[in-house]
Amino acid sequence: MKPAKNLDEMIELMESRGLTVPDHDEMRQILFDSNYYRLSGYFRAFQIDPAHGDNDFKPNVNVSDFLEPCRLDGELRSKILRGTALIELTVRSRFAYLIARNGGAYSYADIDSYELITNRKGVELRTSLVANIRKWMDMSNEICIRHYRKASEPVPIWAAVETMPFDTVSRMLSLHKDTEALKELYRSLGIRTNLRTASEIIHAMVYLRNLCSHHSRLWHREMVIVPPVTRDMRRRYPDFDYKQRSVAQALIALFYLTDKINGDDSYFNELIDFLSEHHHYDEGIHHPLHWE
């Protein structure tokens, strides 16, 4: 087990690896507020060969070099969360409306409403999904849910989806048997592909949202979950290039869905303007680095 280091020991370690720390008092406050472990993800681009254990900093690296992308990540996360919030609220509303219109207003928690699919471990996905739906319903203290509970009445889907996290709604989309409602939902979002690919795009937006909600590093991040990039996305943003598994790969789907909902390219233009103002940072959004 590694012994815990105090703030001065952390600074000593950074300096022993060649980092220039001009103001120790300021650095102590930064480490106290931001967590050394979290900041170390930003160190990697400025270290000699972290993938092979050489964590010494390259010549002439200063604290400001890694603090700037850290700061810009905060700005980008806020912008991304505006887009994912719009997608989440829109998907919730349209999904609930279309399922209810097709007669499924009260069957969303029935296991037979979902496809029988098992994962690699042999776990039946619809069983865990329905358990999750019921858990969130039981935990909810929303006034409208308490009203239905007190009256011993079933909760309609348009109320139920407002109690669940985006991840649960995304799983409902991936397993629901009402393919006509799902097709209409995805068509309304401009996703003209098969249902599996469409659900993967939404799932990737959930992952992106969660990264930003938990203040995770975006700069030079290698994404675990990325959306399939459709032909329509490439046609709408032909000059937006990205490396596989980069944050930029997730952004093109985010741009596409958000602008489709808004009916213009304002969101894309806002984020592109932001990235264009910070060229070095922009490179780190388009190019993941492999440090393991």
Image (cartoon, helix red, strand yellow):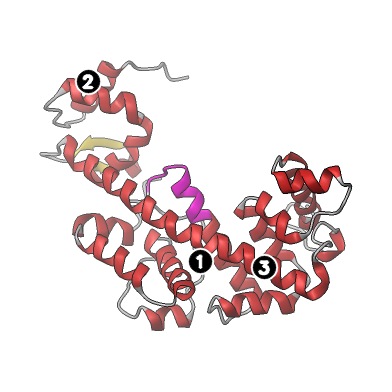
Q: Callout 1 environment at 10 Å: few (<14), some (14 to 19), or many (20+)? A: many
- Give the Cα separation between the discs numbered 1 and 3: 20 Å
Q: Residue at x 52, y 58 (%)?
A: 225
Q: Is residue 204 visible?
A: no
For residue 95, which numbered disc appears in the image?
A: 3
Mark 2 vs 1: CB contact within 8 A: no
For residue 227, which numbered disc appears in the image?
A: 1
Residue 208 picture location, percent across and down: 48, 55
Q: Main secondary structure of the magenta part?
A: helix
Q: Amino acid at mark 3?
A: Phe
Magenta region = 207-217
Residue 148 picture location, percent across and down: 81, 49
Q: Amino acid at mark 1?
A: Pro
The stretch drawn in magenta includes residue 97:
no
Which element type, helix, strand or loop, lies under badge 2?
helix
User: Considering only vertical position in the picture, is 31 above or below 52?
Assistant: above
Q: Residue at x 36, y 46 (%)?
A: 291
Q: Which residue is mark 2?
A: 12
- Give the Cα separation between the discs numbered 2 and 1: 42 Å
Identify which residue, 95 or 26, lies in the foreground.
95
Give the left or right position of residue 142, taking residue 39 as reference.
right
For residue 55, which numbered disc appears in the image?
A: none
Residue 115 picture location, percent across and down: 80, 66
Identify which residue, 80 or 116, lies in the foreground.
80
Identify which residue, 183 or 242, lies in the foreground.
183
Which element type, helix, strand or loop, lies under badge 3?
helix
Give the left or right position of residue 214, taking residue 120 as reference.
left
Give the left or right position of residue 145, taking residue 27 as reference.
right
| Disc 3 versus disc 2: nearer the observer | 3
Q: Earlier in the sequence, mark 1 or mark 3?
A: 3
**Residue 239: quarter of image:** bottom left
